[in-house]
């Protein structure tokens, strides 16, 4: 079977965890549950141990975690999955860079992976009382994002598959954006909260500060001299699939960039940073350009862009067809993008079992047709 060559991106706003978030859970949990079980998640820490770890390391977001567990109906496996404490290992790609000039910083990232391994969800929330906007992973974590202080952050897989006692990195990035205002505060959090795998993190803030750090499995941090990162670390370890991901070539290209903050996104849309191997499971799904001072985000593709901001966030939908870049709009995607005529809160009432049966029978329809009338 050929890998999927398109991805639907949804922009959703929900201040507190509620029916919109629950709709995404109902849609995604069956696949996540199968992954969790097949990768040995059931033999990991118990739900009480997971919650205790969250209270110890990231207590400010423990109430949000509790809300989410209640929202999905409780249960041991969902509670352990949502904590992301000592989860099964997972891999990825990505190129990151931050640049500052005259106090103006930008953070740009390419997200490189297979289209069927990304949730395509841009979520604006106020879960702890502050506004946060970012690309969701593991249903409440973030692969990249920005908060109302202008702090911006993004991750890249560090190239090593070993694990240690720690949290999934996407939950840590959620915590950083919920609790920190500046790069220095974020680095302090990353220093004390252990990651379960090796990850590279690039940050920028509204004061023009930037940073790049390498996280080690089980805890430990190394700060790097340049705010760039790909999929290897500076400890001399041999990265996974280095030839396939071209991590060293991408890193060398990032180090050699001679550009300005407002033009930093341009080389990310071109080789060698832009990856077009979607059929091989390693293509650039989106480029995210964060502007900390204005609290804005632009999702970019070679011939399309989608601009959002914390102050003027618009719900909507885009469908990207990677087999024929650029944007391939769904029949009503333009209207949805401009005005979001879909009431996503209704999606929580979808009969997901019927939807799955239709798809299994080869009769799949656009998910919008399954929304309750």
Image (tube, grey):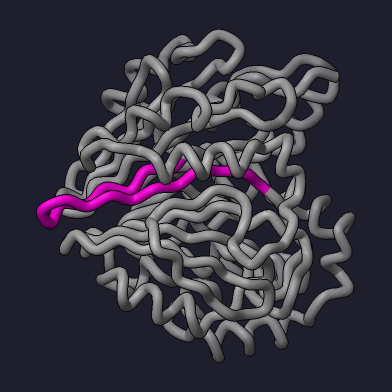
Question: In the rendered image, is residue 14 in sight?
Answer: no
In percent of the image, x 89 and y 55: which residue is there? Answer: 38
In percent of the image, x 33 and y 34: which residue is there? Answer: 265
Horizontally, is 139 left or right of 191 in the view?
right
Q: Position of residue 241 (x, y in %)?
A: 76, 43
Horizontally, is 52 left or right of 88 in the view?
left
Q: Which of 157 and 225 is in front in this view?
A: 225
The majority secondary structure of the magenta stretch comes to: strand
Horizontally, is 150 left or right of 59 in the view?
left
In percent of the image, x 31 and y 75: which residue is there? Answer: 184
In percent of the image, x 38 and y 56: which residue is there? Answer: 227
Report if residue 298 lies within the magenta region.
no
For the image shown, how many numbered marks are present on the structure?
0
- Which residues are the magenta region? 92-109
Q: Position of residue 90 (x, y in %)?
A: 73, 55
When asked about the image quadrant of residue 270, the answer is top left
Q: Where is residue 316 in the image (x, y as percent from the top left)?
A: 37, 30
Instruction: Locate the N terminus by quadrant.
Output: top right
Q: Position of residue 36 (x, y in %)?
A: 80, 58
When asked about the image quadrant of residue 218, the answer is bottom right
Q: Nearer the viewer, residue 267 or 281?
A: 267
Question: In the rendered image, is residue 212 in sight?
Answer: yes
When asked about the image quadrant of residue 12, the answer is top left
């Amino acid at each position: 079977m050929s890998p999927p060559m398109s991805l639907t991106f949804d922009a959703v706003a929900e201040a507190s965890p509620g029916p919109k978030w629950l709709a995404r859970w109902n849609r995604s949990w069956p696949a996540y549950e199968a992954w969790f079980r097949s990768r040995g998640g059931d033999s990991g820490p118990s739900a009480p141990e997971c919650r205790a770890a969250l209270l110890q390391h990231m207590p400010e977001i423990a109430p949000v975690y509790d809300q989410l567990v209640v929202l999905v109906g409780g249960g041991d496996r969902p509670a352990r999955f949502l904590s992301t404490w000592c989860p099964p290992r997972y891999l990825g790609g990505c190129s990151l860079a931050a640049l500052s000039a005259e106090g103006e910083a930008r953070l740009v990232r390419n997200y490189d992976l297979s289209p069927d391994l990304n949730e395509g969800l841009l979520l604006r929330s106020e879960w702890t009382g502050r506004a946060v906007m970012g690309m969701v992973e593991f249903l409440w974590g973030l692969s990249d994002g920005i908060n109302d202080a202008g702090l911006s952050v993004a991750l890249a897989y560090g190239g090593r598959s070993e694990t240690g006692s720690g949290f999934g990195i996407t939950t840590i990035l959620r915590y950083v954006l919920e609790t920190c205002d500046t790069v220095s505060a974020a680095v302090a959090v990353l220093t004390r909260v252990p990651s379960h795998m090796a990850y590279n993190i690039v940050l920028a803030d509204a004061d023009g500060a930037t940073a790049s750090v390498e996280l080690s499995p089980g805890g430990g941090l190394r700060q790097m001299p340049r705010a760039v990162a790909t999929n290897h670390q500076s400890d001399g370890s041999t990265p996974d699939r280095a030839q396939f991901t071209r991590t060293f070539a991408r890193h060398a290209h990032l180090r050699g960039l001679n550009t300005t903050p407002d033009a930093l996104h341009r080389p990310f849309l071109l080789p060698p940073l832009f990856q077009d191997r979607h059929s091989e499971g390693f293509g650039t799904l989106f480029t995210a350009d964060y502007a900390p001072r204005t609290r804005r985000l632009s999702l970019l593709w070679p011939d399309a862009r989608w601009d959002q901001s914390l102050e003027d966030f618009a719900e909507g939908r885009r469908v990207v067809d990677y087999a024929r870049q650029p944007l391939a709009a769904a029949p009503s995607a333009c209207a949805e993008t401009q005005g979001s005529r879909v009431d996503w809160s209704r999606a929580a009432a979808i009969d997901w079992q019927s939807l799955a049966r239709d798809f299994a029978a080869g009769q799949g329809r656009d998910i919008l047709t399954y929304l309750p009338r």
